[in-house]
Amino acid sequence: MGVVSDGRKAVAVLSKALRSRRAAADVRSRLARQPPHPAQHFRVAVYFADGDVNMYQIRQWYKPLAEIAKVWPVVVLSRNATGARAILTDGAVPVAFAPTVRDVERFIGRQDIRVVLYVNQNTRNFQMFRYGRRWHVFINHGESDKMYMTTNQFKAYDFAFIAGEAARQRLGRVLWDYDLDERTIEIGRPQADHYSGAPPYTPDGRTVILYAPTWEGDRPSAHYGSIRTHGEALAAAVLASPAHRLIYRPHPRSGVVDDEYGAANRRIVAAIAAANAADPAAQHVFDDKPDLGWQLAAADVAIVDISAMVYDRLAADRPLMVTRPADPAALVDTHGYLSDAEWLDAAAASRVLAETARVLSDPDAVSRLEGWVRHYFGDTAPGAASARFAAAIDDLMTRWERWHLASVGEPEGKDDEAELDDE
């Protein structure tokens, strides 16, 4: 069995390498057909070292970045070929493809990058940290009470843009000797000012249930995904009801670690297709599109795992339930909203219609959320978060000018040639 397993791994590695090589050739061909980036033009770089499987992390920032770019030109510095190809295909932001550190160095040398934004904690972020005289800022790709939100990696960045007071308190409980007042800047969730899309069905009298599970996680402490434990029973109950409509929006990484988790995901997708074939009026939805917003507004109740989707829904001021992780090793932070959440246990998943009816009939379900919304996001009036995001970037640019003027004439320094060679 070991030989077979090793063989499969070798095939997978080779397949991935060939896919990456083809993607790199495509990216270079596309960029060669475009005008070159103007020299000394960009002021803000979004560093993205991931492939296309994690595009959800950067896509949600496209529209807020477009607003920033009206004042401070923005470019995505992409290190991975499949990720760069996906961003080029989206066509939302300028792209610089820099697969090696030499490429990064050449690009940095031709531009005037003053702020570098990071949407995740990819280990290759460290390769960008070597470049001083610019601010390195973690902006993340969501707000949640997952353990990811308190990693000690926050300390690697000059600043972190956080959603609100809840994030500040969360970091304060976990990180030692971390200057929250100086290094965190509250901006709310500017993505919420740009929610998009429209329901792909005709609204009727059906109760709409959004089920948006996260992926399975790569370690026991992060086993928040519910597709295997809750999902199939939950979906079966909703699909069997003529009075309900299911919107199923699984995390795009579902199944990347656990094949059985991916198989359960595919069975739910197949069940939705079968239900729609049996009753076209049902109009159940398997949602794998990048647009986010209409789902949160259209659903009468949302069922989500411990993930950023909890807080996206929370900001919509609409009833929601949170799946309780079946793995007792999964870390659950009950200092915040999760201490007051409506939980759905795996054993109750088949009774989801009764559980959601109970939540929907609770007159206090929405009013209880209002205080939590303020705690997590601050002012959620339209445009308020976008204004704070823009103000935070402006402030860093002002700080950059002050430090730059104080250090004029001092050499920045170069890395050794051997250290630069990461091809």
Image (spheres, rainbow, N blue to C red):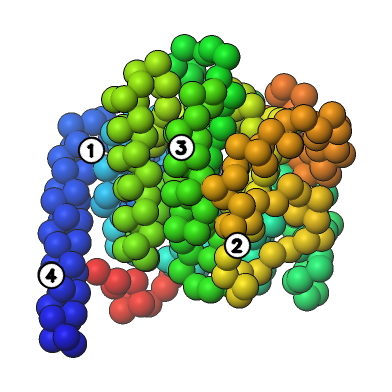
Q: Say few, some or many: other residues with alpha carbon within 10 Å of mark 3 (under 14 / 14 to 19 / 20 or more).
A: many
Task: Identify residue for label 2.
Answer: 325
Q: Position of residue 128 (x, y in %)?
A: 47, 62
Label 2 neighbourhood size at 10 Å, few (<14), some (14-19), many (20+)? many
In front here: 3 or 301? 301
Whichever of labels 2 and 3 marks the residue nearer the N terminus, that label is: 3
Describe the element under mark 4 as helix, strand or loop. helix
Q: Residues within 10 Å of mark 4 (few under 14, many from 20)?
A: few
Residue 397 location (% of width, % of height)? 66, 42
Disc nearest the viewer among 4 and 2 = 2
Across and down, in percent, residue 187 comes to 72, 40
- In the drawing, does residue 387 fall left or right of residue 99? right
The percent coordinates of residue 418 (x first, y second) are 31, 79
Of the pair 411 and 315, the residue shown nearer to us: 315
What separation in Å lies between label 1 and label 4 (alpha carbons)?
30 Å
Q: Which residue is mark 1?
A: 31
* Residue matched to label 3: 248
Residue topped by disc 4: 11
How far is the residue under mark 2 from the one under mark 3?
19 Å
The 10 Å Cα crowd at callout 1, few under 14, some 14 to 19, many 20 or more, is: some
Q: Nearer the viewer, residue 258 or 228?
A: 228
Q: Amino acid at mark 4?
A: Val
Q: CA distance from mark 4 to mark 2?
A: 34 Å
